[in-house]
Image (cartoon, rainbow, N blue to C red):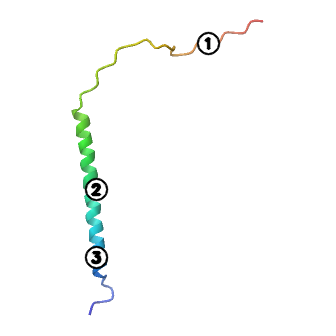
Amino acid sequence: MSRPDTPPAAKIVWIVLTVIITIGIGIYVIKAEFDSIRTIQQTPPPAEAPATISPMPATPPAPSAPTH
């Protein structure tokens, strides 16, 4: 006869499966993060874009005073 405070076997199975799945997801996320960091580090820096003249001035001209 089991004691009344002993959880049923199904509950223990669910807890174990939940812990295993949680650890598995954590390992997957960490591995994916390190893979993306490694990819970023191996990618050569982009070539600098050629300098071009902007069609718009950086600052707009000051408004002129109205004449009467």
The amino acid pointed to by label 3 is Ile
**Around disc 3, counting alpha carbons within 10 Å, would you say few (fewer than 14), some (14 to 19), or many (20 or more)?**
few
- Name the residue carrying label 1: 62
Q: Nearer the viewer, residue 44 or 65?
A: 44
Q: Position of residue 23 (x, y in %)?
A: 26, 60
Q: Quadrant of residue 51?
A: top left
Mark 3 falls on what kind of element?
helix
Q: Is residue 10 above or below residue 45?
A: below
Q: CA distance from mark 1 to mark 2?
A: 57 Å
The percent position of residue 39, horizontal first and vertical second, equals 24, 37
The extreme right residue here reads 68
Between 58 and 50, the one nearer to me in the picture: 50
| Gap in angstroms between the C-alphas marked 3 and 1 | 75 Å
Q: Where does label 3 land, which residue?
A: 12
Q: Amino acid at mark 1?
A: Ala
- Residue 26, numbered label: 2
Q: Mark 2 belongs to which amino acid?
A: Gly
Q: Position of residue 13 (x, y in %)?
A: 27, 74
Foreground disc of the pair 1, 2: 2
Instruction: Give how far across and how far down residue 12 sits, in percent.
Output: 28, 76
Tell me if mark 2 has few (under 14), some (14-19) or many (20+) residues whose alpha carbon lies within 10 angstroms of its own. Answer: few
Q: Are marks 1 and 2 in contact (CB under 8 Å)?
A: no
Give whichever of discs 1 and 2 has the lower sequence position. 2
The residue depicted at 27 percent of the width and 45 percent of the height is 33
Above or below: residue 40 compared with residue 51: below
Residue ID at (26%, 35%): 40
Q: Quadrant of the N terminus?
A: bottom left
Q: At x 34% / y 15%, what residue is drawn? A: 50
Circle 2 SS class:
helix
| Residue at screen point 33% across, 85% down | 5
